[in-house]
Image (spheres, helix red, strand yellow):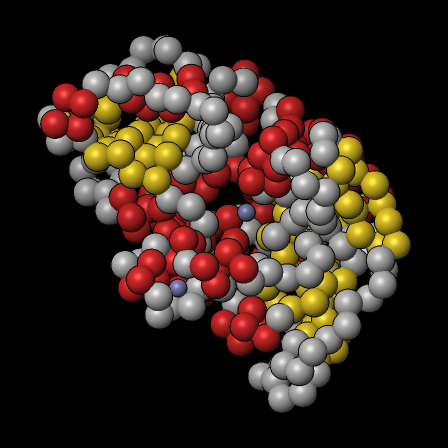
Amino acid sequence: MKAALFYPPLDFRLEELPLPELQEGEALLEVKSCGICGTDLFKVREGKKSQVLGHEISGVIREVKGISPFSGGERVFVAHHIPCFLCRYCRHGNFSLCSQFQQTNIYPGGFSQFIRIPRVNLMQGTIMLPPQLSFDEATLVEPFACVLRNIKRIKPHPEDEILVIGGGPAGIMHVILLRLLGIKRIDVVEIQEERRGYLGKFPVDNIFSPGEGKKEYDIAIVCAGNLPAIQEGVKNIRRGGILNIFAQAPEDTRLDISPNQIYFECTFLGTYSSSPVEQREIMELLKERKIKVSSLITHTFPLSRIREAINIALKGKESCKIIIHPRE
Ligand SMILES: [Zn+2]
Ligand SMILES: [Zn+2]
């Protein structure tokens, strides 16, 4: 099978790998679609390890070994990390900090023609697609689930005024889910002019460039992993507000804040990743067409053109969600 191996920095090579061998209870998935995520781009920029990236995966189960809830032929979404639901982190709802969560993974990665689904991922993180949902749309289950989990942690009040910083895929997904929850005022700050234009298609009240005329917000959701974006959030929350960080920043980033901002009841809150709970909730919303995701997908590429796809994603511009089709 072909897989796209990432070699730091910034290099991708298409290589031939052996088909993964299955152990008892595992399955082989033919990957139909895999989305490029902000965390893939973070690894492309900052990563030191060569690996097959990609974790927003949908496809068809081609083989199962041993006793399994699947028999082969099912169209599914597959989650790459599964929490144990038992440890201290899980009991506190910090599923993504669970050691099992970080150890479990599909093999070798979504930018590959086939992947092995370990037993625990098959039992708890593999969800059947409703017939009306395309493979491309189904890749959005994972990123939307992360956004939903973030919003659950923030617990916005209906009258909150919210500023989303970064109008890429994650920012837009926040806008879509927050609107569905009935949030009245949602503004977005976006640095790129092309993306400010693109944002007009979504239910945003005001679109600003950084530093432009704004006011105090109850919540700032930072969907860009860089210091100026986070500082934009710090500057724009009112007393009692929430600064939320949804994107990983480079390791050496340091934030200078006044402790009095915390004293005057601001909350600093981050969210990393999602759990099978939110993934199933998002699948239900997609099934009922409560959220429409196709407008988020701007580009699709065959695996052989992954470098081009990653370069477009890194630039941002008028691209939003970019999907790789490994079998083309
Ligand atoms: Zn993702
Ligand atoms: Zn756990």
Residue 196 visible to an observer of this rendering: yes
278 shown above or below 209 = below
Q: Position of residue 112 (x, y in %)?
A: 76, 55
Identify the image quadrant of residue 231.
top left
- Quarter of the rendering occupied by the N terminus: bottom right
168 shown above or below 76 = above
Identify the image quadrant of residue 77.
bottom right
Side of 137 where 276 appears, left or right: left
Q: Position of residue 133 (x, y in %)?
A: 59, 61
Residue at image x 85%, y 54%? Answer: 2
172 shown above or below 74 = above
Along the line of sight, the residue nearer the viewer: 165 or 289:
165
Along the line of sight, the residue nearer the viewer: 288 or 58:
58
Residue at image x 18%, y 37%? Answer: 159
Residue 288 visible to an observer of this rendering: no
Side of 182 where 34 appears, left or right: right
Along the line of sight, the residue nearer the viewer: 247 or 141:
247
Q: Position of residue 246 (x, y in %)?
A: 41, 37
Residue at image x 42%, y 46%? Answer: 272
Residue at image x 36%, y 11%? Answer: 212
